[in-house]
Image (cartoon, rainbow, N blue to C red):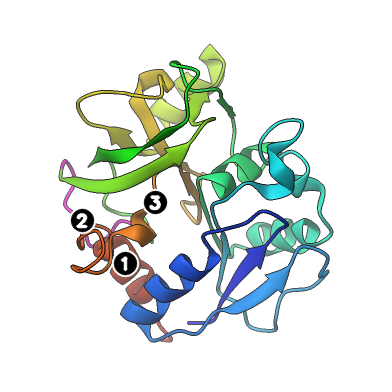
Amino acid sequence: MKAAIVVFPGTNRERDMAIALHRVAGVKPAMLWHRDTELPAGTDLVVLPGGFSYGDYLRCGAMAAQSPIMAAVRAHAERGGHVLGVCNGFQMLCEAGLLPGALLRNASLRFLAMDCVMRVERADTPYTRHFQRGATFRATMAHGDGNYFCDAETLAKLEGENRVVLRYEGENRNGSINAIAGICSPNARVMGLMPHPENCVDPLVGGTDGLPMFTSIAEALAPA
């Protein structure tokens, strides 16, 4: 598997993501700068990591979605490539039109920095195949704009097409519609989620609840 992580001004989770991918898949991802215009040849997975790209000016992820590298990310997705967006990366995917909806201010209007529990709604995606459907796992929230919202028609489509991959279990702290924590594209190869599974891959720093996501990625994108 060949992976690339895109770094924007204000990104702060790229090394956490690189550590998670290396720990599970033995992959050393390429670090791409937002002004790059091409992905490395043979890239299988592009990751848009968390942070505060461009200081979260305008709308979170809106400026990053217009960065030069995003044209290559869109083309990669259109070719059937895999793209994972976490937290700020999820916001970018929505702003870039690769996933529907938007991430609004948290219902409490406060920044949330705490653990949460998610329930797996789909265990057949490249990102969740090592979970059981209905299983729950813990991850870290660190966002001020994680309140997922979309119009009624889009919501009906997401639910009807089984594109809600993860939901918040128990308290829905950011107020996301239908407790949505993560969604995917129709082919399930583009996925966005707000909490950080990459912070839960080591028993010494946060536990290992996030490991199945990276094990899933490694298996799904392993060379034939």
Q: Secondary structure at mark 3?
A: loop
Q: In this rendering, does residue 99 appear at all?
A: yes
Count residues near mark 3 (Cα–Cα under 10 Å), then give few for <14, some for 14-19, many for 20+. many
**Pointer 1 and pointer 3: residues touching (CB < 8 Å)?**
no
Q: Nearer the viewer, mark 1 or mark 3?
A: 3
| Position of residue 111 measured from the top left corner of the image (x, y, whole percent) | 47, 30
Q: CA distance from mark 3 to mark 2?
A: 16 Å
State the predominant SS element of the stretch in magenta: loop
- Earlier in the chain: of badge 3 and badge 2, it is 2
The label on residue 131 is 2
Q: Which residue is mark 3?
A: 196
Location of residue 131 with respect to 173 vertically, above or below: below
Q: Nearer the viewer, mark 3 or mark 2?
A: 3
**Pointer 3 and pointer 2: residues touching (CB < 8 Å)?**
no
User: Which residue is nearer to you in this view: 224 or 95?
Assistant: 95
Q: Residue at left 64%, top 75%?
A: 31
Q: Amino acid at mark 3?
A: His
- Earlier in the chain: of badge 1 and badge 3, it is 3
Location of residue 8 with respect to 92 vertically, above or below: below
| Quarter holding residue 11 | bottom right
Location of residue 40 with respect to 56 vertically, above or below: below
**Pointer 1 and pointer 2: residues touching (CB < 8 Å)?**
yes
For this view, does 136 lie left or right of residue 165? left
Query: Magenta segment, which residues?
Result: 127-134
Q: In this rendering, does residue 221 appear at all?
A: no
Q: Residue at left 63%, top 38%?
A: 94
| Quarter holding residue 7 | bottom right
| Position of residue 118 measured from the top left corner of the image (x, y, whole percent) | 26, 39
Count residues near mark 2 (Cα–Cα under 10 Å), then give few for <14, some for 14-19, many for 20+. many
